Image (spheres, rainbow, N blue to C red):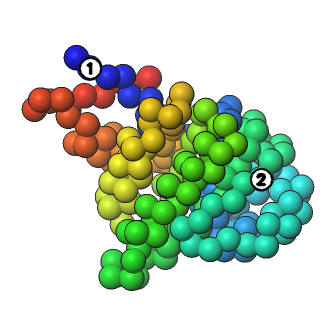
Amino acid sequence: MTTALMIEILTGDITKLEVDAIVNAANSTLLGGGGVDGAIHAAAGPLLHDYCRTLKGCRCGEAKLSPGFDVPARRIIHTVGPVWKDGTHYEAALLKACYRSSFELALQYEVRTIAFPAISTGAYGYPKQEAAEIAVAAMLEYQDRFERIIACCFSERDAMLYLSTLQAMVTIGDRPQFIPR
């Protein structure tokens, strides 16, 4: 017996995805920044900045929601990931909280399709392998509550890291099971 996974791994621009919600790897102000955060703010337009000002920031590990404005996604879930120090400052727990709070907020707003970037792995310096393990574990934990979960990677190399992580985590018997889309 095999179970089809609702997790897709792709390389691309998260701002172009037609899903119910995209997740923004935001900074604590929610007012834009570099990397994914800057790209989402640029694509969504100035109304996102104005709306995020009303949210009054966000703490690390938490998530807040906004309309999608000029991106195809109906909603944007903003979450603030941890800055990597050395792994002894609760970074893993905080990154897990980012994924869980994003998923829980998505469920609260009846999101059925959601796309995540690799939270905290850019300027925040989180090691990509450890971050992928946390992300994929959270996606597997929530996969039965969504029609589609996307790990939207910046590069092919990152996508292959997510794929190998998913294959290592999903096993039936001794064989990894992955159903590509």
Q: Residue furthest top?
A: 1
Q: Quadrant of residue 111?
A: top right
The reply to whether the C-beta atoms of the residues labelled 2 and 1 are less than 8 Å apart is no
Label 1 crowd (10 A; few <14 / some 14-19 / many >=20): few
Q: Quadrant of residue 108?
A: top right
Q: Is residue 141 left or right of residue 59?
A: left
Q: Quadrant of residue 96?
A: bottom left
Judge by depth and name the residue closer to the eye, 10 or 101.
101
Three-letter amino acid code at the position of disc 2? Ser
Q: Quadrant of the N terminus?
A: top left
Residues under labels 2 and 1: Cα distance? 37 Å
Location of residue 15 in the rendering, given as x and y in whole percent from the top left corner: 68, 44
Across and down, in percent, residue 118 comes to: 48, 55
Looking at the image, is 160 positioned above or below residue 26? Answer: above
Q: Is residue 142 left or right of residue 114?
A: left
Mark 1 element type: loop
Q: Secondary structure at mark 2?
A: strand
Residue 151 is situated, as x and y percent measured from the top left of the image, at 48, 43
Q: Tag 1: residue type?
A: Thr
Q: Identify the residue at image location x=54%, y=28%.
A: 147
174 is higher (above) or lower (below) than 1: below
Q: Which mark is residue 2?
A: 1
Residue under numbered circle 2: 66
| Residue lying farthest to the front in this orientation | 108
Q: Examine the rendering and report whether any part of residue 11 can be seen.
A: no
Tag shown at residue 107: none
> What residue do we see at 72% from left, 38% from top?
73
